[in-house]
């Protein structure tokens, strides 16, 4: 994978974290911390999709993001000094197939 390739990343943090935070704590951190400036920066660096959730049973926090380039994602994380949460796993996703694409259009077969 080249730095110029698009990338989907799924982030998963088992909870509670080693430092005792719950999945809802991690979610609330995003609710409180995502600013208009951060959104603009993400778009500038090529983020086309980002969403976060916590499991209903509290067992984990999840986020998924799509970046037009790997280097853009890295630049954003460096600019905002975003580090992994304790125990976080980042999974690079390959392929793209589904019933409906983002925006409600029929997806590729």
Image (cartoon, rainbow, N blue to C red):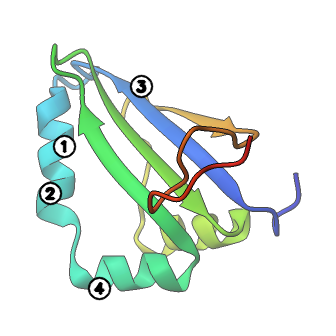
Name which residue lies at 12% across and 37% down. 25
Q: Is mark 2 on a helix, strand or loop?
A: helix
Q: What element carries label 1?
A: helix
Name which residue lies at 87% across and 51% down. 1
Provide the residue designation for mark 4. Answer: 37
Q: Which circle's residue, 2 or 3, is located before the other in the chain?
A: 2
Using the numbered discs, state the Cα–Cα distance from disc 1 to disc 2 in whole angstroms.
Answer: 6 Å
In the image, farthest residue toward the front: 106
Which residue is nearer to you in this view: 40 or 25? 40
Q: Nearer the viewer, mark 2 or mark 3?
A: 2
**Residue 79 as seen in the image, left or right of residue 56:** right
**Residue 67 as seen in the image, left or right of residue 32:** right
Q: Position of residue 28 (x, y in %)?
A: 12, 47
Provide the residue designation for mark 2. Answer: 31
Q: Which circle's residue, 3 or 1, is located before the other in the chain?
A: 1
Label 4–label 3 contact, CB within 8 A: no
Q: Where is residue 44 in the image (x, y as percent from the top left)?
A: 52, 86
Label 1–label 4 contact, CB within 8 A: no
């Amino acid at each position: 994978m080249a730095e110029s390739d698009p990338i989907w990343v799924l982030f998963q943090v088992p909870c509670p974290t080693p430092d005792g935070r719950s999945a809802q704590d991690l979610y609330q951190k995003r609710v409180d911390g995502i600013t208009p400036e951060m959104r603009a920066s993400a778009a500038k660096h090529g983020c086309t999709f980002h969403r976060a959730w916590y499991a209903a049973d509290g067992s984990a926090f999840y986020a998924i993001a799509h970046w037009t380039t790997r280097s853009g994602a890295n630049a954003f994380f460096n600019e905002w000094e975003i580090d992994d949460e304790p125990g976080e796993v980042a999974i690079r996703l390959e392929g793209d197939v589904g019933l409906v694409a983002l925006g409600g259009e029929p997806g590729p077969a």
